[in-house]
């Protein structure tokens, strides 16, 4: 009896540990945020449809998660030796040795292929195409470019802005000005968001050879001014959805208020050039993008 309980406990522990490793490999929180954004855009594009296509919606969520998880898996495979130098990433399954490269590679390939097939056959081919583009550009262009040029942030902002585009084309099955503007809003937001993260993790990034802040001088006023500039630019870009009559006043007011609110921590970062201010920029940015996306949907109800 005691032996049986011990075996069950050991099996449970192993399963729990393996789940945690795979959750880390696919970057569970990031992948969930991507799926959330795509789902919001799907519902936004689904306006006027009397009957919800739950099969397509669920396929988007599962397929989108698998494609995102695959991209994150390939990212960690390529950066496994660099992750050892960063305190934030050194306990990931690959650099810690808890998972082999072969296992991670098989998992990433399976997730990528199954995710793309699900998007292609259960959603539409256009969504599958954008899913493939997002996966390849993130894993095999942005990831290696991080060690070469600060332009990596600009390149990485492209797959980073794909979720709302994926969600829209999954529902509407076409590309045009409206999904293009959804992409643009997320694209511009990426710079404020990622540069704030790069500021917070600058020391770790430098150890791994990643120099991702916009200024060569690092965490200085020059980089802070770039963050302020991107924070300012995202306000008129977000308003374009209203300008072209895709959304109403609820979204407009929310976008303006949230955009202006985001300028205050950016100004404090210029003034103080400290980690506390950078963290506020990052958190405000998270809230900004979530609020305007939800308000975009509310505006259509």
Image: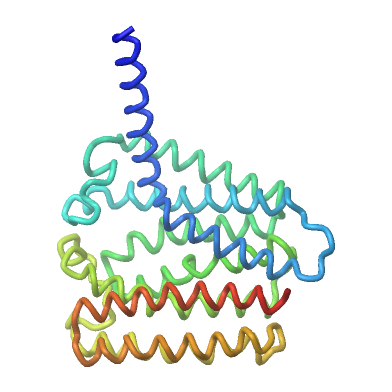
Q: Closest to the observer: 24 or 144?
A: 24
Q: Nearer the viewer, residue 229 or 108?
A: 229
Q: Horizontal placement of 186 versus 271: left or right? A: right
Point out the image quarter for the N terminus.
top left
Q: Residue furthest right?
A: 50
Most extreme residue toward the top is 1
Q: Position of residue 269 (x, y in %)?
A: 25, 86
Q: Is residue 143 above or below residue 230?
A: above
Q: Closer to the camera, 193 or 183?
A: 193
Number of numbered callouts drawn: 0
Residue 184 drawn at (x, y percent): 55, 79
Identified at 35% across, 40% down, the residue is 20
- What residue lies at 47% left-to-right and 67% top-to-bottom? 160
Most extreme residue toward the front is: 1
Color style of the picture: rainbow
Tell me the quarter of the image containing the C terminus: bottom right
The image position of residue 100, as x and y in percent, is: 30, 34
- In the image, taking residue 135 as reference, residue 97 lies left or right, namely left
The image quadrant that residue 227 belongs to is bottom left
| Left or right: where 278 falls relative to 193 | left
Residue 298 drawn at (x, y percent)? 66, 75
* Residue 105, quarter of the rendered image: top left
Q: Residue at x 68, y 50 (%)?
A: 120
Residue plotted at (44% across, 71% down)? 157
Relative height, residue 29 to residue 187 (above, below): above
């Amino acid at each position: 009896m005691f032996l049986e309980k011990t075996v069950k406990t050991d099996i449970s522990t192993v399963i729990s540990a393996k789940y945690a490793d795979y959750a880390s490999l696919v970057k569970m929180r990031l992948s969930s945020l991507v799926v959330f954004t795509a789902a919001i855009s799907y519902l936004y594009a689904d306006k006027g449809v009397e009957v919800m296509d739950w099969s397509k919606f669920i396929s988007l969520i599962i397929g989108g998660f698998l494609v995102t998880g695959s991209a994150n898996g390939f990212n960690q495979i390529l950066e496994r030796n660099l992750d050892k130098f960063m305190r934030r990433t050194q306990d990931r399954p690959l650099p810690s040795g808890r998972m082999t490269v072969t296992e991670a590679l098989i998992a990433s390939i399976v997730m990528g292929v199954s995710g793309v097939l699900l998007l292609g056959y259960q959603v539409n081919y256009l969504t599958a195409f954008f899913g493939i583009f997002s996966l390849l550009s993130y894993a095999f262009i942005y990831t290696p470019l991080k060690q070469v040029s600060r332009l990596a942030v600009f390149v990485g902002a492209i797959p980073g802005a794909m979720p709302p585009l994926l969600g829209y084309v999954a529902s509407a099955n076409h590309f045009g000005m409206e999904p293009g503007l959804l992409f643009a809003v997320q694209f511009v937001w990426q710079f404020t968001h990622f540069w704030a993260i790069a500021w917070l993790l600058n020391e770790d990034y430098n150890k791994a050879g990643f120099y991702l802040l916009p200024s060569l001088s690092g965490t200085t006023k020059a980089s802070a001014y770039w963050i302020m500039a991107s924070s300012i630019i995202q306000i008129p870009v977000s308003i374009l959805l209203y300008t072209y009559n895709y959304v109403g006043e609820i979204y407009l007011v929310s976008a303006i208020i949230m955009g202006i609110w985001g300028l205050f921590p950016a100004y404090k970062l210029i003034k103080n050039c400290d980690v506390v201010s950078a963290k506020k920029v990052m958190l405000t940015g998270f809230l900004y993008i979530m609020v305007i996306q939800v308000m975009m949907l509310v505006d259509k109800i």
